[in-house]
Image (spheres, rainbow, N blue to C red):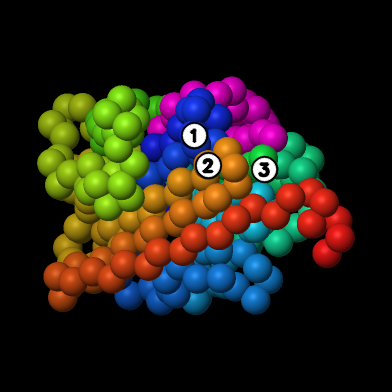
Amino acid sequence: MCLLAFNWNNHPKYKLILVANRDEFFERPSQSLHQWESGIYAGKDLRAGGTWLGMHPSGRFAALTNYRDLKNPRKYEKSRGDLVKNFLEGKLDPEAYLKDIAAEMDQYEGFNLLVGDERSLYYLSNKSGTGVQKLEPGLYGLSNAVLETPWGKLTKAKNNLSVHIQKDVYEPISLMKGQQSKDTEDPELLPDTGATPEQEILLSAQFINVGNYYGTVNGTVLLWDHSGKVEMVERVFDQVKGIHQDTKLDFEIRSKVEQNAG
């Protein structure tokens, strides 16, 4: 993923409300949101085998954004998509998992990683220098810099989610569309991540298209209520053809008793 706005454990009905955009090269193959053989609900990167966002019916949640640093190109053997997949399919609690990842995080290209369960949500970036962080209840934004870096599109994303919460509107497509502005930022307000000035302008939009070869390929909304019901909606975009396809999945988090019995 490349742009997330999420409200964690800060709402009378929902444990987590998340709105996400994924940007990628258009030619990179992926499978849309579905339930894997391992039980997780996620899309799948068909090149490296990992994923960018997903949930397990046991209540494990994870999401990833890339940290954009084009000034220091380097090849890494480990895929960042495995950071999400391995947590969702594993047994370690969120804090223990991230502590293990922190010991080897220099083996991955720049990343921001969220992992959580029914009790807690944690964050780790191999670019922040702050180590494993437990997130308190609240509304957050995450893009291609460290958590809460106030890029214009991130501020707009948080505002979109905040407005929906204030209006008590949680219709997934409305949430998603509110985070798909094509407006770009003024050049003097842009970060220098190593892209060309022209690319930085295009990348500053929420809904991206760079040269018709890279841009926003899907949007996802996740609604996880306190009763354990989860709704995930994904919209996949084919920007070349100008079409989209929606997938909606509903499932329930299994209780600890059911998990132990299984």
Left or right: 26 in relation to 125:
left
Amino acid type of disc 1?
Answer: Lys
Residue 87 vertical placement versus 69 (above, below): below
Q: Which residue is drawn at 26% across and 59% down?
A: 215
Q: Is mark 2 on a helix, strand or loop?
A: strand
The residue labelled by disc 1 is: 13
The residue labelled by disc 3 is: 117
| Closer to the camera in the image, 96 or 25 | 96
**In the rendered image, is residue 110 in sight?**
no
Q: In which quarter of the image is residue 117?
A: top right
Which region of the structure is painted magenta? 119-141
**Is label 2 in contact with label 3 (beta carbons under 8 Å)?**
no
The location of residue 144, given as percent across then percent down, is: 40, 42
Residue 183 vertical placement versus 235 (above, below): above
Q: What element carries label 1?
A: loop
| Closer to the camera in the image, 12 or 70 | 12
Left or right: 216 in relation to 142:
left
Separation of marks 1 and 2 at Cα, in angstroms:
6 Å
**Is label 1 in contact with label 2 (beta carbons under 8 Å)?**
yes
Q: What element carries label 3?
A: loop
Q: Which of marks 3 and 1 is nearer the N terminus?
A: 1
Label 1 Cα crowd, 10 Å radius (few <14 / some 14-19 / many 20+): few
Quarter of the image for the C terminus: give it. Answer: bottom right
Residue 225's disc is 2
Q: Earlier in the sequence, mark 2 or mark 3?
A: 3
Q: Which mark is in front, 2 or 3? A: 2
Q: Earlier in the sequence, mark 1 or mark 2?
A: 1
Amino acid type of disc 2?
Answer: Asp
The location of residue 81, given as percent across then percent down, is: 56, 60
Q: Quadrant of residue 155?
A: top left
Left or right: 40 in relation to 188:
right
